[in-house]
Image (cartoon, rainbow, N blue to C red):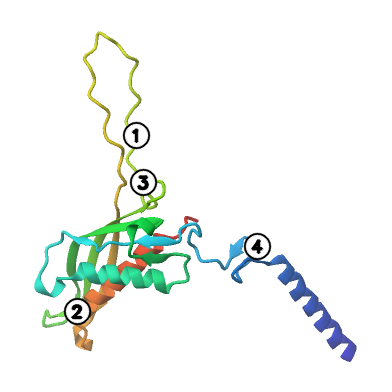
Amino acid sequence: LPMTRITRRTVLAGGLAALASAAGCQSGGDFNLFGYTTQPPFDPDIRTVYIPVFKNTAFLTIPNRGIEVDLTEAIVREINGRRTPMRVVSDCSKADTELVGTIIALNKNVLNRDRQNFARELEFVITAEIVWRDLRNGRSLTGGTPPPPPAPEPFDPSLPVQPPPPPPAVAVPVRVVGVGRFLPELGESNASGQQAAVQNLARNIVNMMEKPW
């Protein structure tokens, strides 16, 4: 019986050693194993991001004023707080990339009502359009770009002179939505729903900055 226990321990130790050798350790303590990795899902070549304050074209009432500032600050905290190679900088000339965005819609929807027809559960919805571009080469990192214009036809002197080619294609904004639910019966308010929507939208925007699978 003691020999059996020793043999099992030996086999287990050998299996763990083989597994450790199969898992390649990278700089920073990350591992690769069977095609999986513990590295953060972000491009390591992108080190800095410049984020100007978002614009706001949505209809505003007093409780919602300044929401674009809250969203910008939430995105900065989300990027700096995650385990990413990126950090937010205040100088555009020293940034690898730039993230610009516009809040285009603010909505509050009733999800559930009680027997007296009072709102029991609601949600605050923020819709924004973002563009993330690489300042080093002008390439759009989110979304696509409009298709290029068709190739010009061979020159024919009998045809009228064609207009000049259109300007270079600009990046197409990507639409992102953040939702925050709140229940007045539990003491939650429009402000808490708005804050939850801001945090949800900030997470969704940073999630879109990950490398594609």
Label whose residue precedes the other's in the sequence (4 or 3): 4
> How far apart are the alpha carbons under marks 1 and 4?
40 Å
Vertical comparison of 120 with 45: above or below: below
The disc labelled 1 sits on which kind of residue? Pro
Q: Secondary structure at mark 2?
A: helix
Crowd class of label 2 (few under 14; some 14 to 19; many from 20; radius 10 Å): some
The disc labelled 3 sits on which kind of residue? Gly
Left or right: residue 147 versus residue 116 is right
What x and y, as percent, mark residue 198?
27, 71
Which of the image's four quarters has the N terminus? bottom right
**Which of the two marks, 1 or 2, is nearer to us in this view?**
1
The disc labelled 2 sits on which kind of residue? Ala
Q: Give me the residue at 36% from left, 50% from top.
A: 143
Label whose residue precedes the other's in the sequence (2 or 4): 4
> How far apart are the alpha carbons under marks 3 and 2?
35 Å
Looking at the rendered structure, which numbered label has been put on residue 191? 2
For disc 4, the marked residue is 34
Q: Give me the residue at 82% from left, 82% from top.
A: 8
Residue 179 visible (yes or no)? no
Q: Give me the residue at 27% from left, 35% from top.
A: 167
Crowd class of label 4 (few under 14; some 14 to 19; many from 20; radius 10 Å): few
Residues 40 and 184: in front is: 40
What x and y, as percent, mark residue 90?
33, 65
For disc 3, the marked residue is 144
Label whose residue precedes the other's in the sequence (1 or 2): 1
For disc 1, the marked residue is 148
What x and y, as percent, mark residue 31?
62, 68
Q: Secondary structure at mark 4?
A: loop
